[in-house]
């Protein structure tokens, strides 16, 4: 079964590959795996003061569909509010990429990674900020170099 | 049940683990079948009945801790009697049967002779959770896998065969250790006859161990040749 054009596009030209500082309190990290095939996926989000996802990165060791699924997921996440991001469903990814039934689990993995990243971010901010995510301490040194700030001009 | 009074009597204690299957009788000589498909006495091929698992096909106890030599001996012995070449002059039915049985024996041996495949197969047979249902791995394990994947990919891209070899050696040793643990876990399971709750717990533990093993296997394959 051949890969769809969209899968090939994301596979050959993956968006947002890389890492964010996992110790940064504004960064949420999700690492998930599929023991059936040995795939491992890391997906990270960086959330701004207003609750919007300002950056997303991923690293995936797996098949083309797993790479494409996580690549697409990071694209969708950028610019969204964290709460909206929890709405992302694997079926959205699967239909966008026209994944065949045997590859649906790759999109499930991407959904799991997104959920885990958001959960990690929420956990960090519940612990650090006390109630709510209101006063996020804007990071010292504003080291934009943290790997983020790639573009900055989404809407 | 309708057979003549061969002195099979009632199998008070089946020779092997009773879980290996209901003792059935050979269609030709009515003696008890050890392998579900090839009679050990008259070598007649018996049709594959209802759901027959790989252990029953080869007539070995349904255990993880099998003697590899004995398994191989069983496979070769049964395959010899079921070889389709011996049935070329027979009825079409017997030819098909020989073919079906031979290929089933091959499947069974291929799975049971590989410790990992055997463990996965047995885990499922015993009603343990599948890796799709329980994906759990130890805390921090996936992070470590991520780092190792990165290192291996880098070594590969750089053509650093020495590094790959070193990783391969470490990973193979780790895999062997992890499989030894799988063997222990199955032994735990087997020693808990009658304790359903504990047995279920054992199967859960085996599942999680096998999950971790499958990632390491993937890494080992990355270090191999090519």
Image (cartoon, coloured by chain):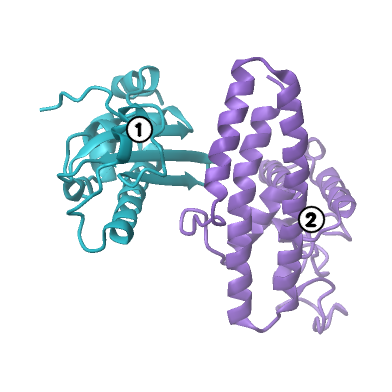
Residue pictured at 38% horizontal, 39% vertical? A43
* Structural crowding at the residue carrying mark 1, measured as other residues with C-alpha within 10 Å and reported as few (<14), some (14–19) or many (≥20): many
Residue pictured at 67% horizontal, 49% vertical? B117
What residue did someone put label 2 on? B38
Marks 1 and 2 close (CB-CB < 8 Å)? no
The chain to which mark 2 is attached is B
The chain to which mark 1 is attached is A
Do discs 1 and 2 share a chain?
A: no
Chain letter of the purple region: B
Q: What element carries label 1?
A: strand
Q: Is residue B19 above or below residue B225?
A: below
* Image colour assigned to chain A: cyan
Q: In this view, does B125 lie to the left or right of A25?
A: right
Q: What element carries label 2?
A: loop
Do we see residue B52 in this rendering? Answer: no
Q: Nearer the viewer, residue B194 or B138?
A: B138
Q: State which quarter of the image contains the C terminus of chain B.
A: top right
């Amino acid at each position: 079964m051949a890969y769809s054009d969209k899968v090939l596009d994301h596979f050959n030209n993956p968006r947002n590959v890389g890492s964010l500082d996992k110790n940064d309190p504004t960064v949420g990290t999700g690492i998930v795996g599929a023991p059936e095939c040995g795939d491992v996926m890391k997906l990270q989000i960086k959330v701004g003061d207003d609750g919007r996802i300002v950056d997303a990165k991923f690293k995936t060791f797996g098949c083309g569909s797993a790479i494409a699924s996580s690549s697409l997921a990071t694209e969708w996440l950028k610019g969204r509010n964290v709460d909206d991001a929890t709405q992302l469903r694997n079926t959205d990814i699967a239909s966008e990429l026209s994944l065949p039934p045997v590859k649906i689990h790759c999109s499930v993995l991407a959904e799991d990674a997104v959920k885990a990243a958001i959960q990690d971010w929420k956990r960090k901010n519940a612990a650090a900020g006390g109630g709510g995510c209101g006063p996020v301490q804007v990071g010292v040194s504003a080291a934009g170099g943290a790997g983020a700030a790639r573009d900055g001009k989404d809407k | 049940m309708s057979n003549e009074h061969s002195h099979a009597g009632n199998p008070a204690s089946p020779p092997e683990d009773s879980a290996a299957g209901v003792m059935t009788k050979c269609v030709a000589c009515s003696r008890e079948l050890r392998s579900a498909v090839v009679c050990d006495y008259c070598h007649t091929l018996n049709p594959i009945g209802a759901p027959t698992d790989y252990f029953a096909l080869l007539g070995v106890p349904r255990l993880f801790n099998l003697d590899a030599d004995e398994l191989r001996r069983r496979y070769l012995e049964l395959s010899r009697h079921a070889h389709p070449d011996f049935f070329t002059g027979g009825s079409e039915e017997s030819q098909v049967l020989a073919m079906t049985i031979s290929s089933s024996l091959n499947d069974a041996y291929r799975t049971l002779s590989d410790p990992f495949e055997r463990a996965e197969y047995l885990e499922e047979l015993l009603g343990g959770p599948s890796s799709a249902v329980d994906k759990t791995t130890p805390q921090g394990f996936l992070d470590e896998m991520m780092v190792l994947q990165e290192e291996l990919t880098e070594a590969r891209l750089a053509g650093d065969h020495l590094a790959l070899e070193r990783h391969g050696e470490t990973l193979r040793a780790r895999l062997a250790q992890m499989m030894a643990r799988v063997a222990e876990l199955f032994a735990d399971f087997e020693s808990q006859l009658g304790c359903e709750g504990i047995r279920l717990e054992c199967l859960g533990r085996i599942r999680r161990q096998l999950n971790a093993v499958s990632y390491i296997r993937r890494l080992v394959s990355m270090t191999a040749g090519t």
